[in-house]
Image: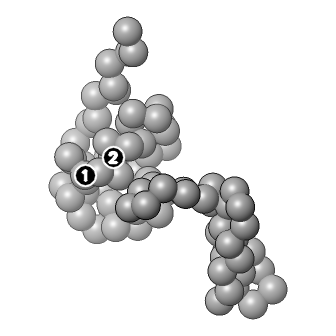
């Protein structure tokens, strides 16, 4: 695997295939967690997600979709209440 670090993004290449592309965080100690990266773990451990940073970030950004809800329900997880609208 190769990681290409550009000014605004990083790209991960596996052989000749682009495996991932993400916007680059430029601040020290910053982290961005992608909910989709956790879906397989969610199936195995659905109760690990409530209160997780990944879930909090996804909900705050409006990225916890009906597809994610279906994964959680299929894994035996609990229904997620949508975040309150911004005021």
Pick the front one: 44 or 12? 12
Q: Is mark 2 on a helix, strand or loop?
A: helix
Pick the front one: 18 or 69? 18
Q: Is residue 63 visible?
A: yes
- The local crowd at label 1, few if under 14, some if 14 to 19, many if 20 or more residues have their Cα within 10 Å, is few
What residue is at 77 percent from the left and 80 percent from the top? 17
What residue is at 69 percent from the left and 56 percent from the top? 8
Quarter of the figure with the N terminus:
bottom right
Q: Name the residue under label 2.
A: 55
**Relative to 28, residue 74 above or below:** above
Q: Name the residue under label 1.
A: 52
Residue 75 shown left or right of residue 22 in the figure: left
Mark 1 to mark 2: distance in Å?
5 Å
Quarter of the figure with the C terminus:
top left
Q: Do the residues labelled 1 and 2 touch (CB within 8 Å)?
A: yes
What residue is at 38 percent from the left and 43 percent from the top? 57
Q: Indicate the position of residue 63 as horizontal and vertical percent values.
A: 49, 38
Residue 5 shown left or right of residue 43 in the figure: right
């Amino acid at each position: 695997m190769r990681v290409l670090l550009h000014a605004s993004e990083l790209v991960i290449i596996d052989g000749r295939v682009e495996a991932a592309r993400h916007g680059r965080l430029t601040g020290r100690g910053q982290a961005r967690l992608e909910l989709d990266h956790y879906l397989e773990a969610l199936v195995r451990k659905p109760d690990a997600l409530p209160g997780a940073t990944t879930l909090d970030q996804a909900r705050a950004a409006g990225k916890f979709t009906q597809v994610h809800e279906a994964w959680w329900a299929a894994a035996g997880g609990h229904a997620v209440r949508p975040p309150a609208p911004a005021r």
